[in-house]
Amino acid sequence: MIADYSINLRQYINDHQSILDIDLVTAHTDARIAWYELLKKSTMIDLSLGHCLQHNQSARISVQLSNCQLARDYLESQPGYQLIGTNSVLKRHDSCTIVNGAIVGEKHYISNLGFCNYHVLWIKNLDQQQVIFFIDNVTGLSKDLSFQPIGMEATKTGKLVFDQVVDYHILYSIVSHENDLRSHYHNFSFCTVSLALCQRLINEINDIARQKNINLGIDIVSHQQLLDSFNDLWYQLLLVLGTSKFDPHKIHRIYSQCKLLIAELLKSLILIGDSRHTQWGLSSQLFRDAVTYVTHRQNFATSLVSYYSRS
């Protein structure tokens, strides 16, 4: 059964309001640590849940960092669990752009789309990219939720189609301090979710090995040791997140190597697994989620030659 996050995500945020409903940028270090630790725990429960929490919080951060008073007032008009946001950078398949002051075209692969209240999106404007904000269901906007991934279905990912949408507000340019700071928090969240997924996969492999009395040798111990090292560096970076001491390159290298680790762990699951991973349903959910996640965003090969992999 696929979780209905239109209900569960709001309820989950409400149930953990003291930890989740904060401004991460201005929060005290202890509160920030608690938020990211809970993001890990949430992902250990359900990858889609962690992914949705991450994107919702990144949407909030994008608004909170801006000087757009209308967007900030909107965010403060209701409790955090009542307002769920989308947060999506420009993708290769996107055709959306601003022409004569109106948004036209399509924006693809938007998480949280099936149950959101507002959007934070990256749009081309005069050969530049700008971060914009608008409330859901504005005139000229339509949703397409026909996208059917093999995993992470509960993220309700889809695309937006724009037909002369003029009711939007520019938050800032991607070439700005605000966007750099937003990226640090957003990318740290991606890394956090990746680390938790790796741990879930290792736990799953160990469980199956015990059930089938399979000796995994040193491979799984080596994978766990590598993950523990990544987690140690993750925590060191968490302590300086948002400060001049934070190194974005390090967090991107962890994220990149987590993709490789996820792929290795999926291989292990295939080699010791059985039909539980090849049939639709709860028994294959983690496996299918991981297959979808490891191909999400930037692939491993591209990450090795990207700007963020350099020292």
Image (tube, rainbow, N blue to C red):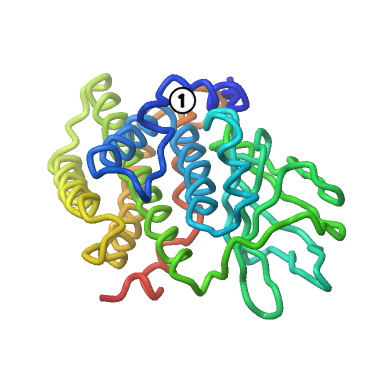
| Residue occupied by mark 1 | 276
Q: Is residue 293 left or right of residue 253?
A: right
Percent position of residue 169, x then y: 69, 58
Q: Residue at coordinates 29% horizontally, 63% vertically from top-left?
A: 253
Percent position of residue 76, x then y: 56, 38
Q: Secondary structure at mark 1?
A: helix
Percent position of residue 306, x then y: 41, 73
Q: Residue at coordinates 23% horizontally, 39% vertically from top-left?
A: 30
Q: Is residue 125 left or right of residue 89?
A: right
Of 133 and 259, the residue lying toward us: 133
Q: Residue furthest bottom?
A: 127
Image quarter where the C terminus lies is bottom left
Of 35 and 88, the residue lying toward us: 35
Residue 292 in view: no
Q: Residue at coordinates 36% horizontally, 46% vertically from top-left?
A: 194
Q: Is residue 237 left or right of residue 78?
A: left
Percent position of residue 190, x then y: 40, 50
In the image, residue 21 above or below residue 266: above
In the image, residue 223 above or below residue 305: above
Q: Is residue 205 left or right of residue 217?
A: right
Q: Quadrant of residue 36?
A: top left
Residue 187 in view: yes
- Disc tally is 1
- Residue type of the residue flagged with mark 1: Arg
Task: Please tell me how crowded label 1 is: few (under 14), some (14-19), or many (20+) other residues with Cα within 10 Å.
Answer: few
Image quarter where the N terminus lies is top right
Q: Residue at coordinates 21% horizontally, 22% vertically from top-left?
A: 213
